[in-house]
Amino acid sequence: MMKIRNLVELFSILPEDERIIVDVLRQIIVAALPEYCKEKISYNVPFFFGNKGICIIWPSAIPRGGIKKGVLLGFWYGNKLNDPDGFLSHGTNKQIFYKIYQTPEEIDEKPIEKLLKEAIRLDRTFKKVSGKLVKG
């Protein structure tokens, strides 16, 4: 697997259905994140962070994501998010909770936006002190 350096490279290797799902999820996330948050390609997939990791989008076409089909939207600190609707699943990872999408039609913005607000609220509790992150 080549090292993916940007979205153009990522989109060029994804199957069309995964490319559409990734694009829709990215648009929802980018619109919801505050100014201080950034996006980068990490582990060959889109990764969004503020003071710490917020969420990640992992298409099944990219190895090491742990899914065989679809696109995973993972919340880095999903175990700390208030998710009364049980929108997110969690497998063997105790920290990252996720939702897997098989088609673009499955994507409902409302629960994603609700969880992003919660994730941003949590991220703001992590403060940078002399270059290191500590729980504030």
Image (cartoon, helix red, strand yellow):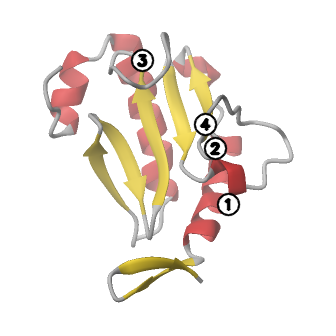
Q: Earlier in the sequence, mark 4 or mark 1?
A: 4
| Three-letter residue code for mark 2 | Ile
Q: Residue at x 32, y 82 (%)?
A: 131
Label drawn at residue 93: 4
Observer-side mark, 2 or 1, equals 1
| Three-letter residue code for mark 1 | Glu
Q: Is residue 68 above or below residue 96?
A: above
| Quadrant into which the N terminus falls | top left
Do the numbered discs 3 and 4 sit on residues whose CB atoms are within 8 Å? no
Q: Which residue is mark 3?
A: 60
Q: Earlier in the sequence, mark 2 or mark 4?
A: 4
How far apart are the two marked residues, 2 and 3, measured between alpha carbons? 20 Å
Q: Earlier in the sequence, mark 2 or mark 1?
A: 2
How far apart are the two marked residues, 3 and 1, measured between alpha carbons? 26 Å
Q: Residue at x 50, y 17 (%)?
A: 67
| Rendered location of residue 94, percent (x, y) | 65, 42
| Rendered location of residue 129, percent (x, y) | 41, 88
Q: Earlier in the sequence, mark 3 or mark 1?
A: 3
Compared across the picture, whether 18 is left or right of 102 comes to left
Do the numbered discs 2 and 3 sit on residues whose CB atoms are within 8 Å? no
Observer-side mark, 3 or 4, equals 4
